Image: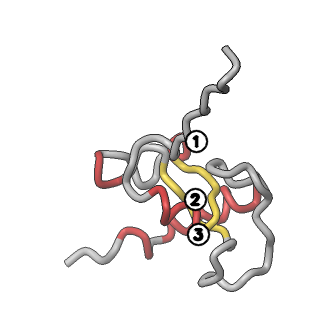
């Protein structure tokens, strides 16, 4: 019986490679502090551009993105990042 693929060596290698790049969070654009506990909201997580539940590849480096834990959780399995609130029109037009 096969185990969880996220516990495998290829996935851990992909996470280490992405983390070593030192890229900012692709969702909010802020830096990801190194050395935080994995449970901290601003810690590094590997996010997938195309969510796994929507057919994204677990081990494809082109599908891997650096993200904060909180940003990744807030995005869920949506395919795009959350959009900003719409701009309100001024009363002077």
41 or 13, nearer to the observer: 41
Residue that badge 3 annotates:
69
Inter-mark Cα distance, 2 to 3:
17 Å
Instruction: Give x and y (percent) for residue 84.
Output: 58, 41
Q: Earlier in the sequence, mark 3 or mark 1?
A: 3
For the view shown, which residue lies furthest in the front direction?
91
Q: Nearer the viewer, residue 6 or 78?
A: 78
Image quarter where the N terminus lies is bottom left
Image coordinates of residue 42 in percent, x first then y, are 69, 72
Q: Secondary structure at mark 2?
A: helix
Residue at point 49%, 62% (across, down):
74
Q: Of residues 86 and 44, which is closer to you in this image?
A: 86
The coloring applied to the image is secondary structure
In the image, taking residue 8 as reference, residue 39 lies left or right, namely: right
- Within 10 angstroms of label 3, few (less than 14), some, or many (20 or more) residues? many
Report the residue at 59% width, 50% height from top.
65
Whether residue 75 is situated above or below residue 36 in the rendered picture? above
**SS category of the residue bearing label 3:** helix
SS state under label 1: loop
Question: Where does label 1 land, which residue?
Answer: 84
Query: Nearer the N terminus, badge 1 or badge 2?
Result: 2
Residue position marked by numbered label 2 in the rendering: 14
Horizontal and vertical percent for residue 56? 36, 46
């Amino acid at each position: 019986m096969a185990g969880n693929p996220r516990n495998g060596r290829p996935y851990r290698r992909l996470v280490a490679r992405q983390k070593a790049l030192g890229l900012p969070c692709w969702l909010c654009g802020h830096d990801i502090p190194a050395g935080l506990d994995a449970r901290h909201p601003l810690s590094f997580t590997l996010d997938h551009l195309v969510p796994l539940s929507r057919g994204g590849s677990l081990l494809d480096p082109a599908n891997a993105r650096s993200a904060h834990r909180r940003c990744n959780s807030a995005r869920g399995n949506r395919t795009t990042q959350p959009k900003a609130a719409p701009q309100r029109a001024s009363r002077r037009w």
